[in-house]
Amino acid sequence: MAEYIAPLRDFKFILEELADLEGVAALPGLEEATPDLVDAVLAEAGKFATNVLSPLNKVGDTVGARFINGEVKTADGWKDAYRAFSEGGWSSLAFDPAYGGQGLPTLVSAAVQEMQNSANLAFALCPMLTQAAVEAITHHGSDAQRETYLEKMISGEWTGTMNLTEPQAGSDLAAIKTTAEPQGNHYLVKGQKIFITYGDHDLTSNTIHMVLARIPGAPDGVKGISLFIVPKFLVDEEGNPGQRNDVKCVSIEHKLGIHGSPTAVLAYGDDGGATGYLVGEENRGLEYMFTMMNLARHAVGVEGYALGERAYQQALEYARERVQGRDSQVPTERVAIVRHPDVRRMLMDMKVQVEAMRAVGCIAAGAMDKSMRSTDQSLLKDACNLVDILTPIVKGWSTEVGTELTSIGLQVHGGMGFIEETGAAQYYRDARITPIYEGTTGIQANDIAGRKLLRDGGVLASWMIAKMRTDMGVLTSVDSEEAGSLHEAMETALNALEDSVTELLAQGESNASQAMAVSVPYLMQFGYVVGGWAMTLAYAAAERHIADSSDDPFYRDKQLSAVHYIQQILPRASACHARIQSGGQLIVDIDDDWFSRAY
């Protein structure tokens, strides 16, 4: 099993041609993100992913995190890798230099995260959650909280977590029961949280938990949730870990995948109450948590296509080496399976969908930078619109497709893919969590079809469709039958998406549940069309280089990727459209006993 290879050429193309790195670097505070600097950062990130993280991926899977005598022990090599990660500055890329960050764009950080996720997802989950916690404290914490926690979290000296889920409250946060009793200048937190990624480990000297809990007398439901900082060790006057707080790991979960990432059950307040500090105002915790959640959702979408990339690389290597069968064109010759048409189809499907998801993910990351820093009100509004519409797509569509691609990778291997020793199965097992955590695909679909369609009357969706239709104009400047066919296919797809918007709005007027019943097909239809939009923009950008007399085959490769995507992948959007047209009435109205009457 070869180690991961960073697709640096594709990153450079996407960042510069599609995600507007130049425009992002012109934003206040990001001026140092020149192409040369970004190239250097990505090259070093690729080396770190290949040389340090990738070799530990199988160790994390086979040895995993272990719960021994009440303490969590990470897999062999994890501590040294994390030390190198922190010392290399990889934890601080996109954060405020005032607290030790490097001040690089989210766009660059997203590309680096992809490499880390491809190389070793179980490892990369720890800094991902820390980054989300840093954002919550940065935007909603007090000056004292920022001074106490940010520098050491950004440096990687301490890590952070998100504590939402409880045994009786999964995605339904209105049902949480963890309490926080006022106690002078702090609160005493009591309750239990489950599914806490890196909720306990041995990598750092302290872990800063971001915990949702209820203050006595708080309103019912989500309106009565507050957010608290609950450190594993209380911080002393010198800013160092001091007394152990009343929070402990009860156990870690035994999971299908990501074995190297400890998923903890945490108990708060078994000895009277864990000391917690209110973030911001009471009863606004869910609002604050969504600062973390939205970043985490984009990051999980990146995980989806990162694992698709890793699965593709391994499947391609195997297909080139595995000799089996004969060439249909030259029946006398035995050939590697990469010569078989169906294997080629699978590999091409994997490659182009990863490229499409990567492009959309990077476009969304660049829009995040603009939404946070742009001083041009028109550009700011457009960036916010892109972030709003693309976030659930990046999370939902990318993770669903990414999981599918890891399954296709197994299929390329044939029977050997089902054997653990090849390593292909790990990517499938690791990927399967990505459509589930940080908001299931159904939750992302409820967001894009509910809040961002039914609630606003289709304004945001229509804006995005109009933008894509305008952007497709670049294809008309390419004088070729091939470009014309891409433009025609995208127009058809955009018309169908527009039709789905109209249909869902009509369904929602009579019964919102019927519209929600087909919200996942709507999310997936939007995803496939957005992927086509990104791939056709890549086609046009590559054409500009070819027209400039570039004989680099990379650019024609990008065009062929776009052609295959439009011909073989975009038609999936039509099937989603047909499901939406059929409506969700039967799904909503069917008798509950229908599910079990055959038994």
Image (cartoon, grey):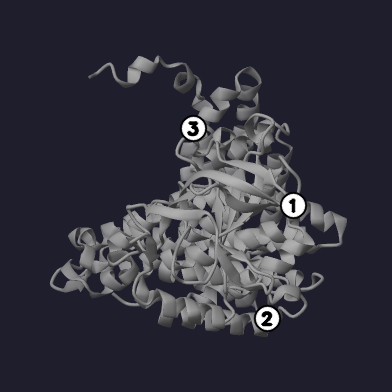
Residue type for callout 2 = Pro
- Name the image quarter holding the C terminus: top left
Q: Earlier in the sequence, mark 3 or mark 1?
A: 1
- Give the x, y percent position of residue 156: 57, 73
- Give the x, y percent position of residue 58: 31, 70
In the displayed structure, 379 sits above or below 30; it is above
Q: Nearer the viewer, residue 93 or 453?
A: 93
Residue type for callout 3 = Ala
Residue type for callout 1 = Cys
From mark 3 to mark 1, how far is it between C-alphas?
A: 30 Å
Disc number lying in front (3 or 1): 1
Q: Nearer the viewer, residue 234 or 488?
A: 234
Q: Residues within 10 Å of mark 2 (few under 14, many from 20)?
A: some
> Circle 1 — which element?
helix
At a point 61% along the width and 39% down the height, the residue shown is 447
Q: Nearer the viewer, residue 500 or 279?
A: 279
Q: Which residue is mark 3?
A: 578
Q: Is residue 320 visible?
A: yes
Q: Which mark is residue 402?
A: none
- Give the x, y percent position of residue 71: 39, 63
